[in-house]
Amino acid sequence: MALFVPGEPGPVDQVRTWIRTVGGAESNVACNLAMLGLRAKWVSAVGQDAFGQAVVAAVESNGVDVSGVVIDPVRPTGLYIKESNAGGSPVRYYRRGSAASGMGPSLLDQLDLHVRVLHLTGITAALSDSCLDLMRALVAVPRETFRLSFDLNWRPKLWPGRDPSVLRELANAADIALVGDDEALAVWNTSDPAEIRRILPDPPTLVIKHGSRGATLIEGGTQLFQPALRVDVVEPVGAGDAFAAGFLAATLAGASPEHRLRSGHLQAATTLRTHDDVGTPLPSELVTSLLNADADAW
Ligand code: KDG
């Protein structure tokens, strides 16, 4: 989506200067993966309009393969705005009837599934009936070579009139599921990791994020908590996507559970420090020293 961030303080109805940038959970993950040096492809749909061109160009400029993006000649590119530039992150969507909401199972033709990870999020399931059909088709694709990663990404503003119980089904179909404890509380009435595991027993890898506190990895009978980095937060939207990318990159590299969580937190820090959905890389020496730091120094 095209993303508008206020360019000056004040309530949105009085803001006259807007900064136009780009956001969207899945493209954020792809951009972060590319930033981490992995080959990433983003598949979606944008309108045949200036915002669509800008979105595709921005994602591509991060090093992401955008060759599978569909240009919809009829429906417009979705937009969203961040209503506040003073902390917090209320967002307002202008995406009903957008090109992305027109996606459906035919998009499978655009997908080259010779990948190591296919990453999906619960946002797509909320966009339309055809998007939900697409999600169901994607989780049903036989996985010979790739792992399916699924981030719950609970966005309450997208669900009125739709049944969010499907999120449990989709998350349980994943090999790697990522869930915020605040999201689990909203959707399943619990933020307790053991209870969340009971609701999501199937993914071999389950990551439960506890906001600024840290994250818990539950995998193969072990449970590991890793605190988050202390960061001066400018605005948190996109941090979960960056975390997912950091975690996935380290997972693909065969890193230890502790390093995988740390890699997620480090990547999240890049986004937390900016109003943009995708941040800029941290100095590599800092990353290396923090990945290998003692637990106390972290
Ligand atoms: O995770 C960040 C996303 O929420 C943001 O980029 C916008 O995709 C978006 C959404 O639907 O909220």
Image (cartoon, helix red, strand yellow):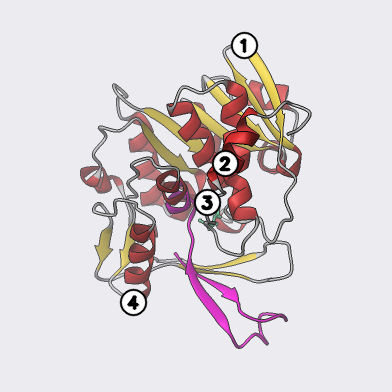
Q: In the displayed image of the protein, which residue is found farthest to the left?
A: 109
Q: Position of residue 141 (x, y in %)?
A: 30, 30
Question: Do the residues bearing badges 4 and 2 touch, measured as CB atoms within 8 Å?
Answer: no
Closer to the observer: label 2 or label 3? Answer: 2
Please tell me whether mark 4 or mark 3 is closer to you in this view: 3
CB atoms at circles 2 and 1 under 8 Å apart? no
Tag nearer the camera, 3 or 1: 3
Q: Write the residue at 57% across / 53% down.
A: 238
Label whose residue precedes the other's in the sequence (2 or 1) = 1
**Residue type at numbered disc 3:** Pro
Q: Distance between the Cα atoms at labels 2 and 3?
A: 11 Å
What residue did someone put label 3 on?
Answer: 281
Residue at point 63%, 35% (across, down): 289
Q: Is residue 24 magenta?
A: yes
Q: What crowding class fits label 1: few (fewer than 14 Cα within 10 Å), some (14-19), or many (20 or more)?
A: few
Q: Secondary structure at mark 4?
A: helix
Residue 50 bears which disc, if any?
Answer: 4
In the rendering, at what x and y percent does residue 274 appear? 62, 61
Secondary structure at badge 1 equals loop
Q: Are marks 4 and 3 in contact (CB under 8 Å)?
A: no
Which x, y percent locates residue 137? Answer: 33, 37
Q: Which residues are magenta?
A: 1-29
- The numbered mark, 4 or 2, whose residue comes first in the sequence reads 4
- Residue 96 image offset from top left, x and y in percent: 46, 66
Q: Which dot marks residue 285? A: 2
Q: Which residue is mark 1?
A: 221
Q: Secondary structure at mark 3?
A: loop
* Mark 2 residue element: helix
